[in-house]
Image (cartoon, rainbow, N blue to C red):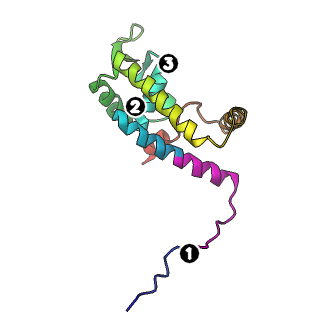
Amino acid sequence: MLIDNQFAPATTAKAPPVGIAFLVSQVGAHAANGFAELLTELELKPNDAGILRLLGSNPGLTQQALSDLLGVFPSQLVALVDGLESRRLIERRNNPLDRRSYQLHLSKKGRKALKEIGRLTNRLEDDLFSAMNRGERLLLHNFMTRIVEQQGLTPGVHPAYKQAARQ
């Protein structure tokens, strides 16, 4: 006896109407998943890549300053920083202004990893936005940057850090 599967997707189903927020979320989730998958080539996770990017742009940040920038408690950052340090991607150096804290710097291996992250990011963006020409990509970038500013988001910091901190 055959059982009628009422939960099987209909082959002629139409997509419901959606708004811009849904489309941004859909593409964002797709991009995040693709980025995470590409990072497996480097044996990194997106949160590792984010920290390397921030330290590449801000050499010498203290762990406290990095936790403030990411919006997470310093204790939650310790494992991430320890992991990157144990893999020799970052270095803790004495802070000449405060002997109780360390400055974080990319190591030579970390700078090389950052360069590879950039290469993978470009590959992902070329794939994701292949339907757009250069001018359209620039326009989209400008629009998204305006939204980030208007919403009070920290430029260059993914909100997933704060989400993970709340869990």
Q: CA distance from mark 3 to mark 2?
A: 17 Å
Residue 65 appearing in the image: no
Q: Earlier in the sequence, mark 2 or mark 1?
A: 1
Residue 156 appears left or right of 33:
right
Q: CA distance from mark 3 to mark 1?
A: 51 Å
Please give the count of numbered marks on the rendered protein. 3
| Image: magenta residue range | 10-30
Point out the residue furthest to the bottom here.
1
- Picture coordinates of residue 162 (x, y %)? 49, 41
- Picture coordinates of residue 134 (x, y %)? 68, 32
Within 10 Å of disc 2 (Cα), the crowding (few <14, some 14-19, many 20+) is: some
Element at label 1: loop
Q: Residue under circle 1?
A: 10
Point out the residue furthest to the top here.
96
- Picture coordinates of residue 99 (x, y %)? 35, 11
Which disc number belongs to residue 58? 3
Within 10 Å of disc 3 (Cα), the crowding (few <14, some 14-19, many 20+) is: some
